[in-house]
Image (cartoon, coloured by chain):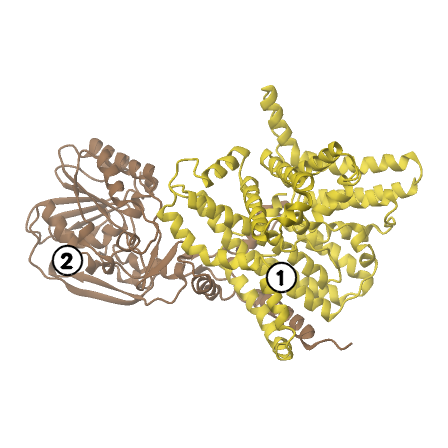
């Protein structure tokens, strides 16, 4: 009996496809890093006689094959489309889209983390900040503005704030949730745009008792084509963002440095815009301590901010109201060693953390 | 190595296909043996020795049983083969279960053994046992070629998660088999369908269970959602694996037995077990139930026989009380159908019978999937609102909406509806011509989707590996 056409066609095409896949994967050189995922890709694990009987070695071979698969980003995109448009899943790997904004689900509320953050802040106040004018604020994440209305799981923001209040006694709370809205965030990243922080700056100045200088901002630099950290994670076609850096004569005259080394740093490190994470444009990335000095300050007030990456975009704008601004990131320095670098005298102190950091605060020390 | 991995799909399988079809017939079993050992070694380097040892034990015992046939020594070697097989299984799979229970009963402090369950030990042990028992019974001829016999035991398609292929089934295929484009076609078709079931459906459903386990707040809806998702997941996971195994076997000229036949359309628990994990049911029937007397005994012995078989079935699935209770539960239900309902079951309206089967299977899998018996019972309580949790939470509603389509597709796919529709379409001349071009493209499309899923995530465990 004659073999039906498809009985030949299916094996030829199927096996041919697998062979082609094998050949292309072998020929294609390994990539060092994934730009859209912002991480180094796993390289071929080195082999030795010791690894021969080590099942971990073979597990790492599998991870290598997945990381280095040809057209990896395209494959991830196919999967995202399958999940979204074939299975009608509302998120893919906790990433979802609302109005051209990419969001990552921040859920559930990690109460012990919030308590840890509150307790840590209180400890810092007790140990370093006796007699200071101390405030704290919480920067809501993107989910706060859209998750409840769109049926996505979300943390109970009010409960989180109540938990913080219950553990922070020595600082005054500043409510910032109404100072921003969804469009103040980058569409493809979790951070706020610097030009979306103007309202927050005004409210902070008001609460901190500072009369903001009357110096309008201009666009210092504009960087189009910014692919935020969610862009690669979503693997879906979304418009890229534009980073706009604000400045004026006062900011232009500011001087920033690292108090731990004395090294001068750029407030806006434009070279970082071409790096793997263009958000590192602020101070060249995240560091333990940064200090900005404002030679044209209209007062002799000093501000210390305990914050995270959200604060780096805000810092130059807030520095306009102070003689100096010190930015401390407790992810990179322990509060126990702060006295070696900072002389806590009579500065105003602001604890300013975003929801994702508070909900995962064990990285703060 | 697992079938649903990039290294299997894009390196192991194409390489094996090239080598296998390039060598002459007499070398094909050697190629399969070498690749099967490499397949196992990749996942369990150290325990490969155990696999080879178990195979050799089966081979040597078979030869000895045959050599001493008709003498008491033959029985001695049969017992010896059973002791070795069950001993290995007992040590690696059940020792810590017994130690834990002894510690509880006698309030002792015996230390647990530091052993990891070797992948597939339950499957290949049962295959070896089926061979030595059948040789002793004279139902199969002893296999004199050690390499071919070890190829049977280590044959990678069914090595780690079945189906449990009795030696008798492929005895002649081991010695000589034919290959054709049609076998390759049917094999690829079956393999691709199984791969899709496992990666696209089962893995996606598994996420619901993960979300349930990490839920911020429990709810009745979430208990039910997770239970239904797991019930579908385990079907797609295990039947998908069996499809892949059967398909791979067919590519290399073997005809493995079917392992699933739409179990969720069963109208009784008895029928369910004729459709679910068929090769295991057949194994226990042939090597435990019938030797105990089967159903041609008085009621008390029937009770004993069925409860023993289902205790063992549960225990085979896992060394924990929830598996034992799960197995015994089925024993009780089968007895209920056999002794109480009898033929009257056919008088119950069909929808009610479907509902009854689906309900007990669902509850059974809640026990099955639990980390312990108490956790399983707690989950069942949760499903019926006995834990004081709300009916639904925003979180549970969200996941119902997010996974609703997959669950619906999985429900439809667990019935013969799609297969029958495809079969019907194949009767039209136009569709036959169209399928000549559509099918090759469809399988490539499917493998691209599977690859995309694999590349995107690393969550890919086969549920049945732990057995």
What colour has chain B?
yellow
| B141 to the left or right of B192 | right
Q: Report if residue A65 is visible in the image.
A: no
Give the residue number, with chain letter if any, for mark 1. B11
Up/down of B95 relative to A70, above or below: above
Up/down of A184 relative to A176, above or below: below
Residue A104 is drawn in which quadrant?
bottom left
* Observer-nearest of A235 and A290: A235
**Position of residue A356 measured from the top left corner of the image (x, y, whole percent):** 31, 47
- Dot 1 falls on a residue whose secondary structure is helix
What colour has chain A?
brown
| B327 to the left or right of A68 | right
* Observer-nearest of B312 and B449: B312
Report the quarter where the C terminus of chain B lies.
top right
| A142 to the left or right of B205 | left
- How far apart marks 1 and 2 lie (CA) works out to 58 Å
* Observer-nearest of A134 and B460: B460
| Residue shown at 17% from the left, 47% from the top | A325
**Position of residue B338 measured from the top left corner of the image (x, y, whole percent):** 69, 41
Give the residue number, with chain letter if any, for mark 2. A251
Chain under numbered label 2: A
């Amino acid at each position: 009996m004659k073999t039906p056409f498809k009985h030949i066609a299916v094996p030829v095409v199927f096996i041919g496809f697998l062979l082609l896949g094998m050949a292309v994967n072998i020929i294609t050189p390994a990539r060092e890093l994934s730009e859209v995922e912002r991480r180094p890709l796993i390289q071929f694990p080195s082999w030795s006689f010791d690894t021969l009987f080590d099942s971990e070695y073979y597990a790492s071979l599998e991870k290598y094959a997945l990381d280095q698969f040809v057209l990896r980003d395209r494959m991830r995109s196919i999967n995202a489309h399958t999940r979204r448009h074939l299975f009608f899943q509302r998120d893919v790997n906790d990433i979802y889209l609302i109005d051209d904004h990419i969001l990552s689900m921040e859920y559930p509320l990690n109460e012990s983390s919030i308590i840890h953050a509150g307790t840590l802040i209180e400890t810092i106040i007790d140990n370093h900040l006796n007699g200071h004018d101390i405030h704290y604020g919480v920067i809501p994440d993107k989910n706060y503005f859209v998750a409840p209305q769109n049926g996505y799981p979300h943390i109970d923001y009010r409960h989180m704030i109540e938990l913080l209040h219950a553990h922070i006694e020595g600082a005054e709370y500043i409510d910032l949730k109404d100072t921003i809205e969804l469009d103040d965030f980058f569409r493809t990243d979790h951070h706020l745009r610097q030009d979306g922080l103007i309202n927050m700056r005004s409210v902070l100045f008001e609460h901190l008792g500072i009369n903001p200088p009357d110096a309008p901002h201009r666009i210092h630099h504009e960087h189009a084509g910014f692919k935020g950290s969610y862009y690669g994670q979503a693997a879906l076609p979304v418009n890229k963002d534009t980073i706009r850096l604000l400045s004026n004569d006062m900011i232009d005259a500011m001087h920033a440095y690292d108090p731990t080394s004395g090294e001068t740093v750029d407030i806006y490190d434009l070279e970082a815009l071409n790096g793997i994470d263009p958000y590192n444009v602020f101070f060249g990335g995240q560091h333990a301590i940064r200090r900005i000095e404002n030679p044209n300050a209209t007062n002799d007030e000093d501000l210390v901010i305990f914050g995270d990456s959200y604060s780096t975009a805000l810092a130059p704008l807030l520095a306009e109201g102070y003689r100096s601004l010190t930015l401390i990131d407790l992810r990179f320095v322990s509060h126990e060693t702060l006295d070696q670098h900072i002389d806590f005298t009579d500065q105003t102190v602001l604890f300013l953390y975003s929801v994702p950091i508070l909900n995962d605060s064990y990285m703060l020390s | 190595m697992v079938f649903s991995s990039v290294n299997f799909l894009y390196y192991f399988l194409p390489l094996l296909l090239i080598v296998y079809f390039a060598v002459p017939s007499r070398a094909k079993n050697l190629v399969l043996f070498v690749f099967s050992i490499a397949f196992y070694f990749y996942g369990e380097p150290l325990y490969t020795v155990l696999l080879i040892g178990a195979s050799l034990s089966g081979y040597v015992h078979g030869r000895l049983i045959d050599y001493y046939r008709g003498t008491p020594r033959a029985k001695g070697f049969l017992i010896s083969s059973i002791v070795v097989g069950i001993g290995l299984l007992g040590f690696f799979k059940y020792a810590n279960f017994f130690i834990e229970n002894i510690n509880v009963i006698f309030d002792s402090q015996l230390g647990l053994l530091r052993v990891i369950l070797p992948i597939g030990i339950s499957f290949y042990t049962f295959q070896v046992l089926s061979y030595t028992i059948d040789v002793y019974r004279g139902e199969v001829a002893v296999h004199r070629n050690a390499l071919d016999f070890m190829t049977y035991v280590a044959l990678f398609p069914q090595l780690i998660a079945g189906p449990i292929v009795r030696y008798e089934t492929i005895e002649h295929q081991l010695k000589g088999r034919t290959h054709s484009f049609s076998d390759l076609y049917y094999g690829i078709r079956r393999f691709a369908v199984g791969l899709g079931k496992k990666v696209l459906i089962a893995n996606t459903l598994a996420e619901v269970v993960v979300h349930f386990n990490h839920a911020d707040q429990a709810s009745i809806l979430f208990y039910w959602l997770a239970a239904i998702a797991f019930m579908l997941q385990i079907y797609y996971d295990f039947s998908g694996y069996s499809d892949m195994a059967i398909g791979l076997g067919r590519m290399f000229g073997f005809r493995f037995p079917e392992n699933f036949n739409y179990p969720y359309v069963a109208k009784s628990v008895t029928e369910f077990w004729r459709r679910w994990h068929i090769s295991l049911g057949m194994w226990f029937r042939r090597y435990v139930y019938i030797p105990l007397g089967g159903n041609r005994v008085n009621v008390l012995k029937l009770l004993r026989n069925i409860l023993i078989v289902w205790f063992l079935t549960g225990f085979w699935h896992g060394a924990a009380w929830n598996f034992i209770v799960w197995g015994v539960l089925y024993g009780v239900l089968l007895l209920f159908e056999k002794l109480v309902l009898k033929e009257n079951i056919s008088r119950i309206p069909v929808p009610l019978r479907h509902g009854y089967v689906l309900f007990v299977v669902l509850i059974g899998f809640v026990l099955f999937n639990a980390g312990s018996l108490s956790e399983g019972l707690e989950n069942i309580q949760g499903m019926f609102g006995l834990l004081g949790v709300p009916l639904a939470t925003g979180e549970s509603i969200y996941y119902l909406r997010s996974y609703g389509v997959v669950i619906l597709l999985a429900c439809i796919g667990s019935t013969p509806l799609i297969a029958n529709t495809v079969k019907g379409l194949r009767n039209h001349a136009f569709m036959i011509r169209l399928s000549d071009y559509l099918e090759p493209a469809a399988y490539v499309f499917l493998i691209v989707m599977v690859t995309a899923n694999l590349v995107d995530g690393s969550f890919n465990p086969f549920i049945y590996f732990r057995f």
